Amino acid sequence: MLRFILSLNIVWFFVCVVIYIMVGLEPSVFWMFSISSLFIPVVFIINILLALFWLFFHWKNIWLPILTLLLGWNPLLLMFSFGEPSTANKCQKEPISLMSYNVYGLKQLKDTSAAIMQMKKNKFISFIRQHDPDVLCVQEDNFFADEIINKAGIYPYFHYLLQHGAAIYSKFPILDKGKIDFGKKTNSCLWVDILLQGKTVRVYSLHLQSNQITKEVTAITKDQDEGDEETIGNLKNMLRKYKNSAIVRSKQAAMVNEDASFCDKPCVIAGDFNDTPFSHSYKILAGDRNDSFLECGFGLGTTYAGALPGLRIDYVLGDLKEIIFCTHKVLHMPYSDHYPVLVRFYVK
């Protein structure tokens, strides 16, 4: 029995090596492996369980899962952050606060009862006022959400284009503004130039291509009455959608990266990437930039509250030499299928 498990462990070792090699590669070429990034946390859990198994039943074989874990060390570093519990002393200047939030149109606030809906609106407004970010980058905005955010009364300046979904609200005057046209209504990228701490900083709010696989994931995980053919059909649809979405995200990320790379100002890129830290789109955008979570977050940093739990798909990135992050917090609020990310930073 132990020999059989060892054989399976050896096969699993080579599977893991292939997955590690494929992390961050171009999805148009290696699309079959791009979806594996969703399951890298599971890969690590399995290897930890294997290490514990060999420790108790045949400790001499423990080297195999440990070697597998070591080979995946770089992806592991993108999963967890072990920032200092107190980061108050990291800011050498008065920090700027920025919140990135996919508000999902604030659909969670709608209710058939006008009184209950007003109560939910008031709670959301209180939440915004409580955390009081200097800059608020929003994704999946709409007229309903925009009206509620404006009722907070703290953002005299904003950049919001009809049917583009992304928006930026600011306490500071906007010197210039624009968009990167993805050719879509629900996925978009807006930018503003704001004067912060004596320097003009460009802030992007972006929402990369959605996977649109929630329906299939829900059907596979919850509906036990489906037959094999229906399950296989859902899996095929999920893979097809993920493949197409990953390719589009990669192109969109390249467009944003090109714009930011040629910008002569320090840049902050915030938003919903709809992709994990192991993806090609994240690799493109994070290449020459700090990730606020890796700099001063703690734990897993999960930002998605939907059908696939444990995912970090919302990010705040800043130019490596000019944007210094002091704090990173994920606020577990019930207003959307995403959690807001609140960071503080200063301009070097």
Image: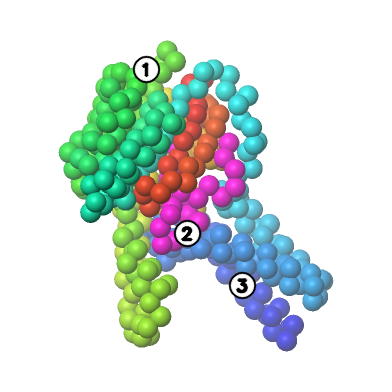
**Label 2 crowd bin: few (<14), some (14–19), many (20+), radius 10 Å:** few
Q: Which residue is mark 3?
A: 12
Where the N terminus falls, by quadrant? bottom right
Asked if labels 2 and 3 touch by Cβ distance under 8 angstroms, the answer is: no
Q: What stretch of residues is rendered in magenta?
A: 296-317
Looking at the rendered structure, the secondary structure element under dot 2 is: loop
Task: Characterize the magenta stretch by its predominant secondary structure.
Answer: loop
Name which residue type carries label 3. Trp
Above/below status of 92 relative to 168: above
> What residue is at 64 percent from the left and 36 percent from the top?
85
Q: Is residue 4 magenta?
A: no
| Frontmost residue, 202 versus 298 | 298
> What residue is at 76 percent from the left and 66 percent from the top?
63
| Frontmost residue, 272 versus 71 | 272
Asked if labels 1 and 3 touch by Cβ distance under 8 angstroms, the answer is: no
Determine which quarter of the picture holds residue 306: bottom left
Q: Which residue is mark 1?
A: 195
Say left or right for 166 vs 296: left
- Which of label 3 and label 2 is nearer to you? 2
- Which of label 3 and label 1 is nearer to you? 1
